[in-house]
Image: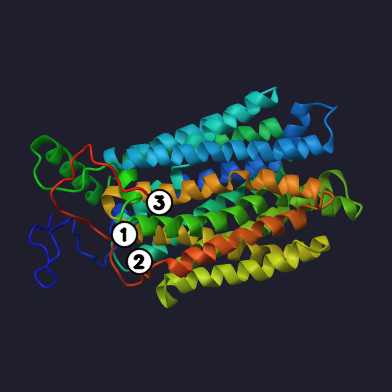
Amino acid sequence: MSKSGNPRTGEPPRIGSLPEGERIQRQQWTTFAGATLGWGLEGFDIALFALILGPAVTELLGPGASSGDIVFHIGLSVTIFLLGWTLGAVFFGVIADYFGRVWVLSLGVLMYAVFTGAAALAHEYWLFALMRFVAGLGSGVEGPVGAVLVAESWRNKYRARATGIMLSGYAAGYFIASLVYSAMNAAGWRWTLTTTLAPALLVLFIRRFVPEPEISKQVQTSRRQGAKSGAPGIDRRFVLARLLSPPLRRKTLCCILIQAGALFAFWSMTTWMPQLIRNVSTSEGNSGGIVASHVAMATALLYLGCIAGYAGFGFIADAIGRKRAFYVGLIVSAISIGFLFPFPHSFSTFLWTLPLVGFGVCTTVGGGFVYFPEVFPASVRTSGLAMANSVGRLITVPGPLMAGAIATKWFDGDLGTAIAATSCLLVLSLIGVLLADETRGLGLPEDSVEHNVPVGSRAPSL
């Protein structure tokens, strides 16, 4: 730990000042691999679930269910999952800041793998939805913990690019899910869903090869020493209270706005796009296996664009700045969504436009995971990222349900127009980016050593 502070600026001493070295070490690669696989296999889980959701809900509701009932319960399933994701991210994000990142990552992988696979055994809708809620509790923390692990391990000029490429694993998981769905769809949705148990094996790799970042260990040590002796250390207020208090409150709110707008577009699009493609393909006279292959093909192309968007953000941000990289994603999203979804198009038009949609939306969504760790100090870093992502998700929990309701009640079942209408909330992301600070060229923020705030103190109200 650095104890001298900065004599030029008078800043207090810092916790965890680590050199920004340039050489990539073995533990950085293993951390990158563990985080990428964890996040990627979660993407596989979510995408495969979205692909089987229509047939699964149709079967579970029974032959008497109307198309409106099916659409409503599909949206409800995703909404329940997002609620679990929101709660799990905040809870486990706080745990990760107090007790370490790596074991929380392992627990999250086990939860989403086991309970998604268990949904294949459900024969009633309520049990199916319950399994999805518990899986959401584990899924919520994978992205925040993985991004923080990579950011804290890659403390060099490659940090943004490494984090962005790690995030592309999520879209790669979606892409692999489309291939699995194409290969196993004929076996039925239950057998297809059992493949989501595979990520549980990743825990063995994480526990063996992914080390806890040194800065995380230092923060935990400082907390323990401060609690025992009352000596100066990091701020001892509860981490969520700190995030909603100056000087972090403004940064937290900016991050929430960025993520909320992007997630409205992302979840509405990824939830309803498979069903939209089914409708388009059916309207062109196709049926059965051809429709399923069209859904798989369109999904694969959408997520190829997402891979480029996630991975590309770090490179774009290093070249032109974080805020300008967000603007690139927002502009591409607005143009591609505005062209594709509100108007009738052929299946072939969807094929060449969906990669652009994926690139734009996922550049914006993924950019938050690169940018947010550069905003918060280590003692609240996972909590800050989780809160921004989770409050954004909490705001967007109604998104899939809302898109389905909009399509049914306002647009005569037109899912494309409903997706476009919901995606207009990307304006929230634009506002957040406009108010945010530029962090290009800066190191990760560090915790100041200061006299502890009494444990019983309250954060200022908003």
- Amino acid type, callout 2: Tyr
Q: Which mark is residue 56?
A: none
Earlier sequence position, callout 3 versus callout 1:
1
Q: Gap in Å between the C-alphas at discs 2 and 3?
A: 20 Å
In percent of width and height, residue 83 lies at: 54, 38
Q: Which mark is residue 158?
A: 2
Report whether 20 appears left or right of 10.
right
In percent of width and height, residue 369 lies at: 44, 57
Q: Which mark is residue 154?
A: 1
Q: Are marks 2 and 1 in contact (CB under 8 Å)?
A: yes
**For the point 8% across and 57% down, which residue is it?**
3
Crowding around mark 1 (Cα neighbors within 10 Å: few <14, some 14 to 19, many 20+) is many
Q: Gap in Å between the C-alphas at discs 2 and 1?
A: 7 Å
Q: Residue furthest front?
A: 461
Q: Secondary structure at mark 2?
A: loop
Is residue 461 visible in the rendered image? The answer is yes
Is residue 186 visible in the rendered image? The answer is no
In percent of width and height, residue 354 lies at: 69, 62
- Amino acid type, callout 1: Trp
Residue 107: quarter of image: top left
Q: Secondary structure at mark 3?
A: helix
Report whether 114 appears left or right of 99.
right
Crowding around mark 3 (Cα neighbors within 10 Å: few <14, some 14 to 19, many 20+) is many
Question: Which residue in the structure is indicated by mark 3?
Answer: 385
Q: Secondary structure at mark 1?
A: loop
